[in-house]
Amino acid sequence: MTTKFTKDHEWIRFDDAGATIGISAHAAEQLGDVVFVELPEVGKTFTKGADMAVVESVKAASDVYAPISGEVVEVNQSIVDDPSKVNAEPMSGAWFVKLKPSNPAEADELMDEAAYKAFLETL
Amino acid sequence: MTADLKRTPLYDLHLSLGAKMVEFAGYEMPVQYPDGVLKEHIWTRTKAGLFDVSHMGQAFLKTKRAELGSDAAHADIADAIETLLPGEIRKLKKGGMRYSVLLNKDGGVMDDLMVTRPARDDMQGVLFLVVNAACKDADFKHIASKLKDRAELDIAGDRALIALQGPLAVNALQTVVPGVETQTFMTMKPYHWNGVYLIVSRCGYTGEDGFEISIPNDSAEEFASLLLTHSDVAPIGLGARDSLRLEAGLCLYGHDMDETTSPVEGNIAFALGKRRKEEANFPGAERILSELANGPARLRVGVKPEGRAPAREGVEIVDMNGAKIGIVTSGGFGPTANAPVAMGYVDFAHSKTGTLVQLMVRGKALPATIVDMPVVPHNYYRG
């Protein structure tokens, strides 16, 4: 299973069923205590880079962008019910949505973990 | 971080405590410490939070027309500052303090501030002023120039300001400064600590019981560090300071009030002294008294979103038909309320408590209600 990252700090992980998307540990840490998450409806389609979800901490609101184009096939209601989960397990249990990619080749442009770590060093 | 940002005397302490520093009003200030905004907020509501508010402006305004140390000297300096603000300063008791606003000629709020009459007999004829960081240069220029013939303004750039806020603040502070426990809300007393002069005021910006301690810059770090050794005291950043004051319904100048807002519109008419209203001799009195009699065009109100989505500054408030009736001026998530909390301005006709409104958040109309402030009750010590 490969995990890739965007410059906007989303991660995307591919398996046989499709792609799972969340926000990176760095993003969760920068946001601080997450208090609100808004997720899209199942069935909605997004093009790469479109606003897909919203995550808010006490102080700030932040958009979550679609790392690739596709259709939402599942959303993680548990982070809506308990937003603090985004801080506790950003890279695992606190995934945001599962997408059915419409153009999987878009993922080739994303960073792998090593590249993302190098990117964080530049911030 | 830009090189020309100013630093408070507690800068090194903030770094050693692991603070995340941000720019605020020209200063490098701690927005949060490793615990984060949520925990810092709850800590302050339940224990005692230590805030560096040294960026705020402190000054002493002294009469030039009477010898210091008499009631007449106080009356003179009170009359002087009363030409700039609508509060009752003359009748303040020794050691009493008042929340007030500097007004422009149209009755708009230039800043909000604390005005204190010193407790010491020999300091009568002096007022101690604390103003907002972002406005301090303009405020001090305004006060000094308007009152130049009768008063002298000494800007206390050599003093830091430390706030200790929360239900256990009094217990912690009295271990270091015995006697503070006898002070009631909105009173000031001078103390000596370690050879330096402290001005301790029982007030704050969180809605909790607490104190603000003015201390010479050179002693600030030692004093703050000593308070932090107390197990109930933790350092708190500007992030939690904002969420605390929001729950307490307190204005952030430049957001919830500005030069266009009158104190009536700002819903702080309590800051208008009874005698001052009768005398009608403060800047913008005509507008302000007319608004008191007839109702202002708009009013600052609490706005409670029904759902979980925070409504932040700039969100439009619309009526049930979708017509714009106002705007959110401060909003976010209230950790104690465990819900989104907001305040803003609405047309007077829609300002009644219980009015149903809608908030335009990311293009969607979310239901909300006009509510009384504060959302979290104040917990002041009135004796």
Image (cartoon, rainbow, N blue to C red):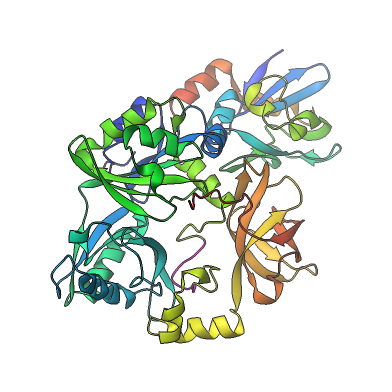
Q: Which residues are magenta?
A: B256-262
The residue located at (45%, 61%) in the rendering is B254
Say whether residue B47 is left or right of residue B67.
Answer: right
Residue B23 seen in the current view: no
**In-front residue for pair B92/A8:** B92
The residue located at (15%, 73%) in the rendering is B66
| Majority SS type along the magenta span | loop
Image quadrant in which the N terminus of chain B is located: top left
**In-front residue for pair B129/B198:** B198
Is B84 within the magenta?
A: no
Residue A26 seen in the current view: yes
Q: Position of residue A28 (x, y in %)?
A: 59, 29
Q: Position of residue B311 (x, y in %)?
A: 65, 52
The residue located at (49%, 81%) in the rendering is B288
Occupied quadrant, residue B371: bottom right
Occupied quadrant, residue A116: top right
On screen, B4 above or below B278? above
Is B260 within the magenta?
A: yes
Say whether residue A43 is left or right of residue B179.
Answer: right
On screen, B235 above or below A20? below
**In-front residue for pair B222/B316:** B222
On screen, B196 above or below B130? above
Marks counted in the figure total: 0
Q: Position of residue B249 (x, y in %)?
A: 57, 56
Q: Position of residue A77 (x, y in %)?
A: 80, 32
The residue located at (49%, 40%) in the rendering is B166
Say whether residue B340 is left or right of residue B286.
Answer: right
